[in-house]
Amino acid sequence: DTGLITLDPGYKNTGATKSAITFLDGELGILRYRGYRIEDLAEKSTFLEVAYLLIYGELPTQSEYEKFSREITTHTLVHEDIKKILDGFPSNAHPMGVLSSMICSLTAFYPDSLDPNRSKDEVDLSIIRLIAKMPTFAAWAYKNEVGHPVNYPDNSLDYCSNFMKMMFALPAERYDVDPIVASALDKLLILHADHEQNCSTSTVRIVGSSQASLYASISAGINALWGPLHGGANQSVIEMLEAIKADGGDSKKYLAKAKDKDDPFRLMGFGHRVYKNFDPRAKIIKKAADDVLAKLGVKDPILEIAKELEHAALNDQYFIDRQLYPNVDFYSGIIYRALGIPTDMFTVMFALGRLPGWIAQWKEMRENNEPIGRPRQVYTGANERDYVTMNKR
Ligand code: SDX
């Protein structure tokens, strides 16, 4: 019954689904959420408005937006029993592992989320809970790492200010969120919100296709994003730039390493499966990096190293031949650093941004009653053979 199997490792040429959410044009470097240009949304919208757009398909009216953001605000608190799970983690637990575990625990805590036939309102409640609680879990994962007491949400603040306060406030002193920081973070979350069928989104879809709960599917997406070839790249870019700085700033040497077939080193933050031109998000983030660092009065030598590296790579035949350009991860870490966010929280920031996209894609897959994902293979193992008892092996 196999018929003709087309082998397509990494699904480079496979359309896994039909989707009305995000449009990419890799040749022209175009990205649109529900038809709206990413450049317009990054400049004029807010992260919660973009989350609503991705999930429900239209920009919200004033009353729809107020209802959506009010519901999110009233669900930011986490039950104390779930907080006990946090206390079980050692302080060296990577925040991404803490985050995916805490999100998955929501399935145990809200078992109704396992019911594939639950009502639209119940699905909407899960969506609100996830968007509301993810920042709380993310900030708690950081507090667990630094050994500080966790902060509870402050519902008088906007989404990003509330996150920054939960991240950095300390009982011993007053903490005021810098509006420049909150606005820079909001723009970064918009730029990460969805990206059609990337690795982590495909993971969310395939886990959800078995009728697993939304929470379990999102937890799986967080784990897929963690890898350095995907969302983990923003952390690897900074580590790479730091290494170049420590090595005297000689970016040419690292370019040579990246081109050397025998060297596993890749230029992190460069290249993309779809974009064979500039990643439009990278352009926006590069400009935002200059703006935000200037406004914050931050001078970061690795920003200059990043620009030199970009310039060298864009003029190098190896990168030109392979159409390798900076991607979303190349400059984002420089802004996160300027906002005071520690390096091993960068991929958590990516997950915070990508959450509405994962939710929208999961919801679309379930509403379209898509079949369970179950690809085939080309078998290359042993032919039929008889069992050999241990004493004859
Ligand atoms: C994200 O899919 C998405 O949309 C992802 C994302 C999203 O929003 O969800 O955009 C977010 O994950 C961005 C990508 C972050 N990852 C990195 O920056 C890691 C470095 N980049 C590479 O690992 C790579 O470019 C990928 C993983 C992004 C894409 O890999 P592909 O499409 O499988 O390309 P490939 O590995 O087949 O590379 C093609 C050629 C190879 O050389 P040849 O074998 O043809 O000689 O280009 C080379 C690769 O060796 N190459 C690189 C390179 N990226 C590709 N060489 C050096 N440095 C690099 N960064």
Image: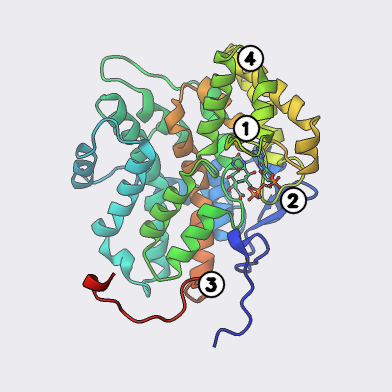
Which quadrant: the N terminus?
A: bottom right
Element type where label 2 sits in the image: loop
Q: Is residue 225 above or below residue 253?
A: below
Query: Which dot, 3 or 1, sits closer to the camera?
Result: 3
Q: Amino acid at mark 4?
A: Gly
Among numbered discs 1 and 4, the one appearing first in the sequence: 4
Q: Amino acid at mark 1?
A: Phe
Classed neighbour count for the residue bearing mark 3: other residues with Cα under 10 Å, few (<14), some (14–19), many (≥20): few
Question: Which residue occupies the foreground of this view, 93 or 245?
Answer: 245
State yes or no: Cβ of the residue under disc 3 lies below 8 Å from any atom of ligand 1: no
State yes or no: Cβ of the residue under disc 1 lies below 8 Å from any atom of ligand 1: yes
Mark 3, residue position: 377
Q: Residue at x 34, y 16 (%)?
A: 174
Element type where label 3 sits in the image: loop
In the picture provided, is 163 more to the left or to the right than 65? left
Q: Is residue 13 above or below residue 385?
A: above
In the picture provided, is 45 more to the left or to the right than 92? right
Classed neighbour count for the residue bearing mark 2: other residues with Cα under 10 Å, few (<14), some (14–19), many (≥20): some
Relative image position of residue 39 (x, y in whole percent): 71, 40
State yes or no: Cβ of the residue under disc 2 lies below 8 Å from any atom of ligand 1: no
Q: Quadrant of residue 295?
A: top right
Question: Which residue occupies the foreground of this view, 297 or 209?
Answer: 209
Q: Specify the label residue 330 is tagged with.
A: 1
Quadrant of ligand 1: it is: top right
Mark 2, residue position: 26
Q: Residue at x 30, y 14 (%)?
A: 173
Q: Specify the label residue 249 is tagged with.
A: 4
Question: Which residue occupies the foreground of this view, 198 or 355?
Answer: 198
Which quadrant: the C terminus?
A: bottom left
Relative image position of residue 117 (x, y in whole percent): 37, 75
